[in-house]
Image (cartoon, rainbow, N blue to C red):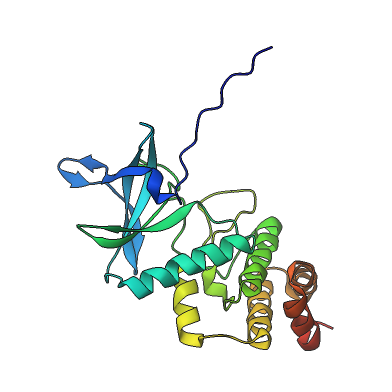
């Protein structure tokens, strides 16, 4: 029995495969699908050299990035993905018109906009969501970055507990704290757990989330967590 040939899938991180990046247009203007303090997100399209295309999200920064800042973003993306963070495929791309932009898989849809909610991250209603949030923050610490609670960005509606991470905040906090020690990163995890538990379940929930952080932590971060355990 002959197997059907498997088509080559375009991969966002391989710049050599991309022929052109363009904005989706409506009424002569780029289609805006989201945005916040750091930039606006537009619908776009990648055309690959094999003729295939892919819809993407293109983030244009409000304050243009220089080369060093763009490298910090790409370094954070690579490190977080390596640590197991559930990031979409994304990459920093330099364009003639807008300088450095961030290109990623499309969240939501062109018509419905982004599925990421720009609202308070203190209240995560679902148990699965809180579990995933603590795992993500602990992996941020494993990657060497400060895992502050404002990295959490909830999705609109139920999403099987999936909680995305705000790359802008990751990069900014790392720039502010430089190379945060393991002890500092462990303390940020403790603060995040205390805050989430205060709004959702109290001390019992804090203990449960602490156990999840211990299980998820790398050996160095685990040791730092065990030394400061505020929930014993």
Q: On the rendered structure, is 30 left or right of 188?
A: left
Answer above or below: position of 18 versus 75.
Answer: above
Residue 105 drawn at (x, y percent): 45, 48
Residue projecting furthest to the left: 28
Name the outermost residue toward the right.
232
Residue 213 in which image quadrant: bottom right
Residue under the image location 59 percent in, 48 percent down: 159
Answer yes or no: is residue 136 visible: yes
Residue occupying the far top of the picture: 1
In this rendering, the count of numbered labels is 0
162, 120: nearer the viewer: 162
Image position, residue 230 (x, y; %): 77, 85
**Residue visible at 57% across and 65% down?**
80
Look at the picture and state if 183 lies above or below 202.
Answer: below
Task: Tell me residue 187's x, y (percent).
Answer: 66, 85
If the image is split into quadrants, where does the C terminus sit? bottom right
Residue 230 visible at all: no
Quadrant, the N terminus: top right
Q: Closest to the observer: 21 or 176?
A: 21
69 up-or-down from 109: above or below: below
Identify the residue at horizontal 23%, vertical 60% (top origin). 98
Residue 83: percent from left, percent from top: 64, 64
When asked about the image quadrant of residue 95, the answer is: bottom left
Residue 204 horizontal side relative to residue 88, left or right:
right
Above-or-below relation of 14 to 213: above
Can you tell which quarter of the image residue 152 is in? bottom right
């Amino acid at each position: 029995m002959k197997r059907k040939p498997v088509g080559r899938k375009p991969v966002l991180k391989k710049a050599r495969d991309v022929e052109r990046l363009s904005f989706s247009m409506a009424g002569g203007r780029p289609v805006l699908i989201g945005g916040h303090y750091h930039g606006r997100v537009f619908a776009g399209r990648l055309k690959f050299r094999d003729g295939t295309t892919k819809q993407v999200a293109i983030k244009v920064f409000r304050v243009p990035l220089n080369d060093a800042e763009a490298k910090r973003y790409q370094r954070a993306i690579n490190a977080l993905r390596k640590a197991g963070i559930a990031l979409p495929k994304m990459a920093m791309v330099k364009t003639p018109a807008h300088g450095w932009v961030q290109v990623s898989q499309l969240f939501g849809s062109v018509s419905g906009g982004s599925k990421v909610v720009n609202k308070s991250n203190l209240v995560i209603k679902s148990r699965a969501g809180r579990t995933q949030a603590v795992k993500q923050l602990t992996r941020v610490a494993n990657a060497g970055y400060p895992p502050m609670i404002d990295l959490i960005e909830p999705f609109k509606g139920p999403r099987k507990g999936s909680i995305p991470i705000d790359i802008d905040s990751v990069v900014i906090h790392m720039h502010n704290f430089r190379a945060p020690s393991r002890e500092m990163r462990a303390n940020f995890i403790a603060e995040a757990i205390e805050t989430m538990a205060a709004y959702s379940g109290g001390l019992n929930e804090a203990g449960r989330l602490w156990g999840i952080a211990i299980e998820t932590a790398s050996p160095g971060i685990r040791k730092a967590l065990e030394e400061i355990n505020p929930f014993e």
